Image (spheres, helix red, strand yellow):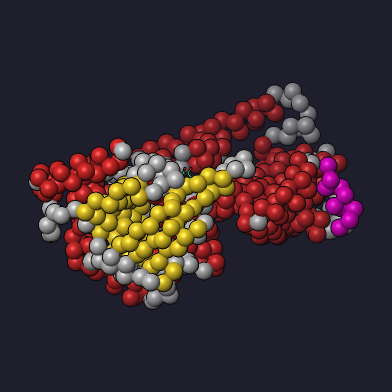
């Protein structure tokens, strides 16, 4: 998993190369995973650590199956997922709008920069408890932590993306007497799209972190809550189940953004491969 | 539709507070349907002059006219070509060429019909659906020419249109441009660094001084039209090129 993620980030060009090599690329990571699992199983069989510290993979699998059946896993996944998606939606939207305004109005940047920079450089875990105090331990505070953690990178990427639209293309649009709206939709949006999607990739993963941070502090549902609960009961297998579920959620979100990227930025990969 | 410029001066605010005179004062006139080249040392204000004529920038003093109307902003009768092709990499060749029509609210059908007609002239028949990243420099430049021609402009402003090309491609494209011009007879003002190109294409060559640029020579080219590449070896060509070179060196 890690390997394919890295290669996607590092060289998207090579991703589609050589079909006969594809199975090798799938096979080797699978083998590595399998060996890690085997190692994990062996360590637990040696009984160096008690099962509540490192439960054997079989126990984890059984636990996974059990919470899947009794509906608890789905319940908590749903809570986290809805916080993640709402947070992502709110954070990205606000980041895009404010980022665009800042990119277009330097005055706005000058007045907002100090606030934004100090908020951004404060770790979210530090002020997340405040958000829970203000917005309660229900879903709202999770949406807010998730939205906040997504907001800043989106904002930064939007500012960079819009500011870096080539000046000659702006001149072109002016020479062709494009309206403001036309310049926005036909120049600024598509020109900034690669940067924006890059930001969205990061945001998708951050949104999960944000929601879980909120759930850690105080909650009555969600995978973060499940982790806290399971830990207090020394149910380490359940902790691992929740962690794996979170990893899967983050991975699926990332993958969805990659699909979107391939669709929206088809021109990039086509231009590169030729 | 001719172009004229009266006492046009442009002064930039220099970084650090002072002022930086970039251009002028310049005064000249280009008759409707003639092809005029502008040569001069780097930084003398050629691009600035083109931007003023394109309505992208207001002169500090003086006035520029399109026909006899003062220029106050970009006009649909003027086509502007930039130093590099300046295409949108996310648009296909046909959508890049059709951009001016699209912005003018013309229907997709009509747009593509117009592009379809133009592609063979540009030597891009099979490339309508290609992206700029898939084109050579010369082809990209042809797309840029297409984007200007599709507006059917009466005036062409070309700012070093072939600057980024190698000598061979450049020669070929300038001859192509000459053919298009012979057909439509637009009024052309072209900035170039290439004296041969200037002489081969133009009716007149304007020479500018160092910054702030002023017109220091206005050299007529008496070569007969239609012209072709071989005219480079003629006597008239050699003499005119020599004149231009001498004017620049002054
Ligand atoms: N936006 C600007 N702000 C300040 N000064 C500028 C600006 N644009 C150009 N200049 C200055 O104005 C002068 C003329 O610039 P211009 O681009 O018109 O020159 P040019 O003749 O086109 O040069 P080149 O042949 O290198 O393209 C230059 O000295 C340049 O430094
Ligand atoms: Mg220039």
The image shows residue A181, relative to residue A159, as above or below, that is below
The image shows residue A47, relative to residue B157, as above or below, that is above
Q: Residue at x 30, y 62 (%)?
A: B30
| Residue A20 point in image, percent of width and height | 35, 40
Q: Residue furthest right?
A: A133
Residue closer to the observer: B24 or A268 = B24
Tell me if residue A254 is in the magenta stretch. no
The image shows residue A165, relative to residue A40, as above or below, that is below
Identify the image quadrant of residue B93: bottom left
Residue closer to the observer: A217 or A52 = A217
Visible residue check, residue B20: yes
Residue closer to the observer: B63 or A37 = B63
Quadrant occupied by the N terminus of chain A:
top right
Magenta-drawn segment: A126-135
| Residue A36 point in image, percent of width and height | 60, 31
Image-based side of A271 in relation to B202, left or right: right
Identify the image quadrant of residue B250: top left
| Residue B48 point in image, percent of width and height | 44, 52
Residue closer to the observer: A114 or B74 = B74
- Chief SS of the magenta region: helix
Visible residue check, residue A264: no
Q: Residue at x 78, y 43 (%)?
A: A118
| Residue A185 point in image, percent of width and height | 52, 64
Q: Residue at x 33, y 55 (%)?
A: B158
Image-based side of A27 in relation to B120, left or right: right
Q: Residue at x 56, y 37 (%)?
A: A2
Tell me if residue A134 is in the magenta stretch. yes
The number of callouts visible is 0
């Amino acid at each position: 998993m890690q390997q394919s993620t890295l290669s996607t980030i590092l060289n998207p060009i090579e991703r589609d190369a050589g079909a006969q090599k594809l199975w090798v690329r799938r096979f080797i990571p699978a083998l590595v995973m399998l060996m890690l699992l085997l190692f994990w199983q062996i360590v637990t069989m040696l009984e160096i650590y008690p099962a509540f510290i490192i439960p054997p993979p079989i126990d984890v699998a059984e636990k996974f199956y059990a919470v899947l059946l009794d509906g608890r896993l789905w319940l908590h996944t749903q809570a986290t997922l809805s916080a993640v998606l709402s947070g992502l939606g709110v954070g990205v939207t606000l980041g895009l709008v404010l980022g665009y305004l800042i990119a277009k109005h330097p005055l706005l940047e000058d007045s907002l920069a100090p606030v934004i920079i100090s908020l951004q450089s404060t770790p979210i875990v530090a002020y997340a408890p405040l958000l829970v105090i203000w917005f309660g331990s229900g879903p709202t505070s999770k949406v807010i932590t998730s939205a906040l953690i997504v907001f800043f990178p989106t904002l930064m990427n939007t500012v960079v993306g819009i500011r870096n639209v080539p000046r000659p293309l702006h001149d072109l649009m002016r020479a062709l007497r494009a309206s403001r709206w036309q310049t926005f939709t036909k120049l600024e949006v598509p020109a900034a799209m690669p940067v924006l999607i890059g930001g969205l990739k990061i945001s998708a993963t951050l949104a999960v972190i944000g929601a879980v941070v909120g759930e850690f502090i105080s909650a009555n549902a969600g995978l973060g809550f499940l982790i806290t609960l399971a830990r207090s009961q020394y149910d380490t297998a359940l902790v691992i189940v929740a962690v794996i579920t979170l990893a899967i959620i983050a991975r699926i979100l990332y993958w969805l953004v990659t699909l979107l990227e391939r669709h929206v930025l088809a021109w990039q990969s086509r231009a590169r491969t030729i | 539709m001719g172009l004229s410029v009266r006492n046009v001066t442009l002064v930039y605010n220099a970084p650090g507070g002072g002022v930086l005179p970039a251009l002028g004062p310049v005064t000249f006139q280009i008759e409707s349907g003639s092809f005029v080249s502008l040569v001069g040392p780097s930084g003398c204000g050629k691009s600035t002059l083109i931007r003023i004529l394109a309505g992208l920038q207001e002169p500090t003093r003086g006035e520029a006219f399109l026909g006899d109307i003062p220029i106050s902003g970009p006009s649909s009768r003027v086509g502007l070509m930039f130093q590099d092709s300046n295409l949108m990499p996310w648009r296909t060749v046909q959508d890049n060429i059709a951009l001016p029509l699209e912005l003018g609210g013309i229907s997709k059908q009509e747009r593509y019909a117009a592009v379809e007609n133009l592609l063979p002239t540009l030597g891009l028949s099979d490339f309508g659906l290609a992206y700029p990243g898939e084109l050579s420099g010369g082809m990209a430049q042809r797309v840029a020419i297409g984007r200007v021609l599709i507006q059917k402009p009466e005036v062409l402003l070309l700012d070093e249109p072939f600057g980024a090309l190698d000598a061979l491609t450049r020669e070929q494209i300038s001859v192509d441009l000459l053919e298009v011009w012979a057909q439509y007879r637009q009024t052309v003002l072209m900035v170039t660094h290439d004296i041969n190109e200037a002489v081969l294409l133009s009716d007149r060559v304007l020479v500018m001084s160092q910054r702030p640029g002023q017109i220091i020579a206005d050299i007529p080219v008496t070569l007969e039209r239609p012209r072709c590449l071989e005219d480079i070896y003629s006597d008239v060509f050699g003499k005119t090129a020599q004149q231009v070179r001498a004017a620049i060196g002054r």
